[in-house]
Image: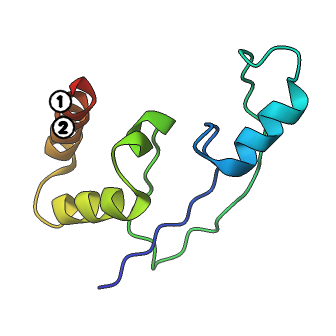
Amino acid sequence: MKLQAVQLTENHTVHNEIEEARLLSEHLDDPKIVIGAINESSHKITKSDHFAKVASDGLFDFFSNKEAIELVHGFISIYPPSFISRYLHGLFDKTAAF
């Protein structure tokens, strides 16, 4: 089965070239100010959608969209949802601690 991530928002970090340019153009006087721009998008959920992944920007400092959906998909085919939530929370905590 081929998995495809549908990203509904932009990352509001300076690692995103478009966001970096926006921040620099809007805050020439004070580069310490960071305000996320509102962007809206939608995706109609269909039977071909297997799950939705909602996460903060911090997740994507460690995992690409592809890595995150492959990890979640692997777990949902084997484990109950309550286990997956606890495991992923622990995994992200350990990864972020490094």
- At which x and y percent is residue 37? 78, 36
Q: Quadrant of residue 50?
A: bottom left
Mark 2 residue crowding within 10 angstroms, few (<14) / some (14–19) / many (20+): few
The amino acid type, in three-letter code, at marker 1 is Lys
Residue under the image location 63 percent in, 47 percent down: 16
Marks 1 and 2 close (CB-CB < 8 Å): yes
Quadrant placement of the C terminus: top left
Please indicate, yes or no, whether residue 56 appears anywhere in the rendered image: no
Q: Is residue 59 left or right of residue 41?
A: left
Q: Is residue 78 above or below residue 37?
A: below
Q: Is residue 48 above or below residue 73?
A: below
Q: Secondary structure at mark 2?
A: helix
Residue under the image location 11 percent in, 56 percent down: 79
Q: Is residue 16 left or right of residue 3?
A: right
- At which x and y percent is residue 67? 31, 60
Q: How is the image coloured?
A: rainbow
Q: Which residue is mark 1?
A: 94
In front of the other: 88 or 43: 88
| Disc assigned to residue 91 | 2
Residue under the image location 37 percent in, 65 percent down: 66
Residue under the image location 63 percent in, 37 percent down: 14
Q: Secondary structure at mark 1?
A: helix
- At which x and y percent is residue 33? 75, 17
The amino acid type, in three-letter code, at marker 2 is Leu
Q: Is residue 95 left or right of residue 59?
A: left
